[in-house]
Amino acid sequence: MLELPGFPWDSLAAAKARATEHPGGIVDLSVGTPVDDTPAVAREALAAASNAHGYPTVWGTPECRASIRRYMQRRWNAPELTDEHVLPVIGTKELVGWLPILLGLGAEDVVAFPEEAYPTYEIGALAAGARPLACDDPAGLPEATKVIWINSPSNPTGRILSVDELRAFVARVRELGALLVSDECYGEFAWDAEACSVLDPRVCDGDTTGLLAVHSVSKRSNAAGYRAGFVVGDPQVVQALVGLRKHLGMMLPAPVQAALVAMLDDDTHVQLQRERYLARRALLRPALEAAGFTVDHSEGSLYLWATRGEHSSATVDWLAERGILVAPGTFYGLKAANHVRVALTATDERIAAAVERLRG
C-alpha cells in the first residue's frame, strides 16, 4: 500500500471545534471552496447535455478543445494552438497528483516546486517515488530535475511572478531538458500585478516546447463541484498524456465538457466574481492589519498571506478563539511556518462577521 503523509486539513479538527463554539458561529476561511452560485450559463449547458448515453472521449469533444484554444488565445495571449496542444482533465488536482506517475518518473528523478506551495506538488512526486525538492531559484535546480512546478498567482501566498521571473524558469527548463508546468488556476484573480501565462510569447517566445499551462474553472466560475480543468502546451507531451489516459479511463464527463465550453466562452460572470472577491478583500485585509497582522505578497489569488510574527499554530489558535478558522502555513512548507492562509471564499455576511471579530 502506498504510504503518503496525512491529509493536512484533518489536523484542523480541534481548531475547527473551538471556532464552532463561538456564539456567532464559525467563519471558515481555511479552504478555497467557492461559496457563490455557479453561473447560469454553466448550469443550463450541463442540463442541455445531460442525455449522455455514450462514453466521452479522453481528448474531449471538438467543441471543448476549440473553446480551450479560444480562451487561451483570447485571455492569455497564447500562440496559435491546435487541438494537439490541449487536453481537458478531471479537475486540476488530479493532474497535479498524477503527472509524475504518468511521466514515468522514479527514484533518480527530481520534481521541483515552490518553497511555499500547494502540498499536492510534493504528494505527486512522492506517489511516483521521485524526489521532491522545494526550490524558488531556477539556477539552483539540479541536473536530475525532470519536472518544475511554478504557481502564479500562488496558492498560498498570492505572489505573482513577473515576466522576467517566468523567463528565467523557461530558460532553465530548456537547459535541463525538463518539463515546466505552470499552475495558472488563479490567473483570473490578479489584484496588484499582472498575471501572465507561461505560454505568453513574452515568456516563451512563441515556443511551447517543454511547457504546460494548467487551468481550472473551479475558482474562475465557482464550479469546483464540476471537476473541470485543462492543460495546454507542448503537443508531444499533451498527446502522450492523452494516450496514457485512454488506458486509465481518465475522461471528463460529456455534460461537464459542455458546461466547460459555456464557462470558457463567457467572461461576464468572471468579472462579476472578481468584483465580489475584491469587495471582500477590501474589508478583510485592513481588518487583519488593524488587528496586528502583516499581509505579505497577496498580489493575487483568493487568499491573504498573513503573519503575527509567531508560529502559525499559535495564530490558528488565536483566531479560533474568535470563531475564525484559517489554514496554518505549516501545510505549505517549512518556509511558511509563521504565516496563515486566510481565504476570501466566504459569503459577504461571514466576511463581515470576521471583520467585526477582528476589531474585537
Image (cartoon, grey):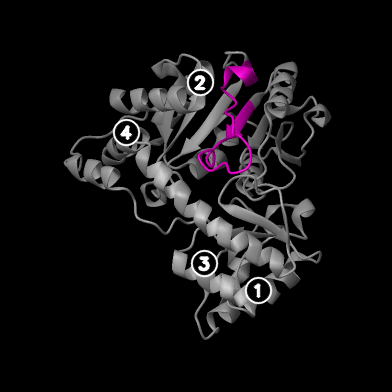
- Residue receiving disc 1: 319
Residue 141 is left or right of residue 227, and the answer is right
Amino acid type, mark 1? Leu
Identity, as a three-letter code, of the amino acid under mark 4:
Val
Q: How crowded is mark 3: few (under 14 residues within 10 Å), some or many (20 or more)?
A: many
Query: Can I make out residue 88 in this image?
Result: yes
The foreground one among 178 and 292 is 292
Magenta segment:
180-204
Q: Position of residue 12 (x, y in %)?
A: 61, 69
Location of residue 68 (image quadrant): top left
1 with respect to 177 (left or right):
left
- The CA distance from mark 3 to mark 2 is 36 Å
The quadrant of the rendering that contains the C terminus is bottom right
Q: Tell me the amino acid under the disc marked 3.
A: Ile
Query: Residue at point 52% right, 59% down?
Result: 280
- For badge 2, the amino acid type reads Ala
Say above or below: 48 vs 245. Answer: below
Q: Which image quarter: residue 124?
A: top right
Marks 2 and 1 sit apart, C-alpha to C-alpha, by 42 Å
Principal secondary structure, stretch drawn in magenta: loop
Foreground tag (3 vs 4): 3
Q: Is mark 3 on a helix, strand or loop?
A: helix
Q: Mark 4 points at which residue?
A: 261
Gap between marks 3 and 4 measured at Cα: 32 Å
Q: Mark 3 points at which residue?
A: 351
Residue under pointer 2:
78
